[in-house]
Image: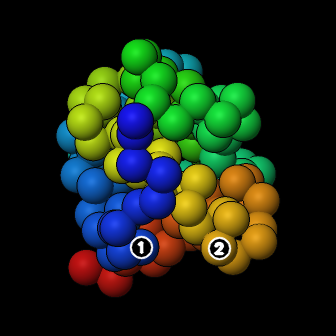
Amino acid sequence: MPKSKSNLTEADVLRLIRKHVESLFPKTCSNCRRVYANYREYALNTQPLAQPVSYHAELGDWKPTEAAGNLSLANCSCGTTLAIGSETMPLDQLWPVLLWVKTETERRGISQQDLLGKLRDELRRQVLKD
Ligand SMILES: [Zn+2]
């Protein structure tokens, strides 16, 4: 049986997500070929779109066998939508994050999208502060 509650703190979760997100850079815009050298440069120069989406969380699939399915979108300055996704995230790092999302949405009584939006905003704040 999988654990039903997460022992991670929000700081732990942010650290896991940030480590993964940082691993996706440098990132190149498919349209204007602009290169974002790191997450900080990306956060500074893109416009976040709506809330991040987790299809795993929406489906209640807390231990997916594929890492793809969690997505955060932002617009490049040229207007093209860029995506940061979980597809290359190791499952043993993704699962604890999903379990935390499940635990925290229940504890806080908020939607998954609101929680993911808060995480994304906090991650951007952190990286811009550094
Ligand atoms: Zn672009």
Q: Is residue 24 shown above or below 124?
A: above
Residue in the picture at 40% in, 39% down = 2
* Residue 116: mark in rendering: none
In the depicted view, which residue is nearer to us: 43 or 52?
A: 52
**Left or right of 102: which side holds 99?**
left
Q: Is residue 97 shown above or below 126?
A: above
- Counting from the top left corner in percent of width and height, residue 22 is at 25, 48
Q: Residue under circle 2?
A: 107
Give the colouring mode of the picture: rainbow
- Counting from the top left corner in percent of width and height, residue 72 is at 58, 42
The three-letter amino acid code for the residue at tag 2 is: Arg
Residue in the picture at 69% in, 76% down = 108
In the depicted view, which residue is nearer to us: 64 or 80?
A: 64
Q: Is residue 36 visible?
A: no
Tell me the quadrant of the picture where the N terminus can be found: top left
The answer as to whether callout 2 falls within 8 Å of ligand 1 is no
The three-letter amino acid code for the residue at tag 1 is: Glu
Q: Residue under circle 1?
A: 10
Residue that extends furthest to the front in the rendered view of this protein: 1
- Counting from the top left corner in percent of width and height, residue 76 is at 57, 42
**Left or right of 103: which side holds 93?**
left
> CA–CA distance between discs 1 and 2?
13 Å
Tell me the quadrant of the picture where the C terminus can be found: bottom left
Precedes in sequence: disc 1 or disc 2: 1
Tag 1 secondary structure: helix
